[in-house]
Every structure is written in C-alpha cells, then in structure tokens.
Image (cartoon, rainbow, N blue to C red):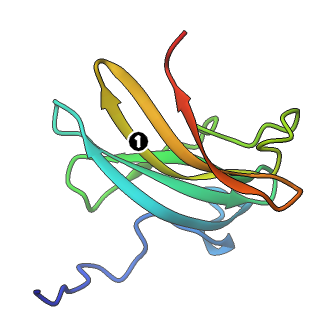
Amino acid sequence: MKLLDRIQSSRLIPGDETHAFRDPCCWITADPMLMRDWDGLYVMNFMKYNRARSAFDTFACSYDLNHWNEWLGEPTVAPAGDDPEQDLYAHKPWIITWEGHVYHFYCACTKNKRRYIALATDFS
C-alpha cells in the first residue's frame, strides 16, 4: 500500500466556528462519500453537526476534488422531530442511484438512544 500525502493544509469543508462565513452554527463535518455525475461534477455527501439543526446530511460539489462549493440550503436528510424513530439525528450518508432512483442510506438516531440504518428515496 502506498503512503498518501496531504495535498493542502486547509480544510476542504470547514467544521468549526473559525469559519463563520460558511456556517456559524457548525461544530462538525464528517463521514464523506463521493459520487461523480455524467458531466464530471463530483458530489461529496457528508454529515454535519449544527447547533441549530442537530446532525444531518448535506453535500458539496467540485470539478477538481480540491475546491468545493458547499450547499448551505436545506439538508438532504435531517431528523424528523415528529417521528420518534428518528427524532435526534439523521446522518452518515451512503448514496447510490439504481434504475433511475436515488437511495440515501443513513444512520437514524432517537432520543431514547436507539440507532439504526434508515433509507430515504426519491419515489413519489
């Protein structure tokens, strides 16, 4: 196995208050997984812990894997306060497309300290 070198000293996706220009409530960014679309755009799905929203999944895009534009809109998957099966966290994404549909697997956590794998899809 080859030893890998870090290619830059700065963080690709900020995860703390020192980067308030991005998301001042963010404490953690973690658990990345990458996909590439047919136009060469890379999409990094990752979890974020934010004081205002808890832990949730979001994404960033890049054409060169070094410079990322983070989505700061609504999460791709977030906790559902009205659903006791995932009322605390919805995070740690793994996403695939199959037969024209998106399958977003994630860890759902409850306030009762239960954790399990959940699935969100684009089926109507």
Q: Which class describes the residues within 10 Å of circle 1: few (<14), some (14-19), or many (20+)?
A: some
Which of the 4 image quadrants contains residue 1?
A: bottom left
Mark 1 is on which residue type? Ile
Q: Is residue 2 left or right of residue 124?
A: left
Mark 1 = which residue?
A: 95
At 82% across and 45% down in the image, what residue appears?
Answer: 87
Quadrant the C terminus occupies: top right
Q: Is residue 85 left or right of residue 44?
A: right
At 56% across and 31% down in the image, what residue appears?
Answer: 120
The residue sitting at the bottom extreme is 3
Percent of width and height locating residue 92: 54, 56
For residue 123, above or below residue 71: above
Percent of width and height locating residue 89: 73, 52
Check disc 1 and report its element: helix, strand or loop. Answer: strand
Percent of width and height locating residue 33: 37, 55
Front one among 93 and 76: 93
Q: Is residue 93 left or right of residue 3?
A: right
Front one among 93 and 65: 93
Which of the 4 image quadrants contains residue 61?
A: top left
At 68% across and 61% down in the image, what residue appears?
Answer: 49
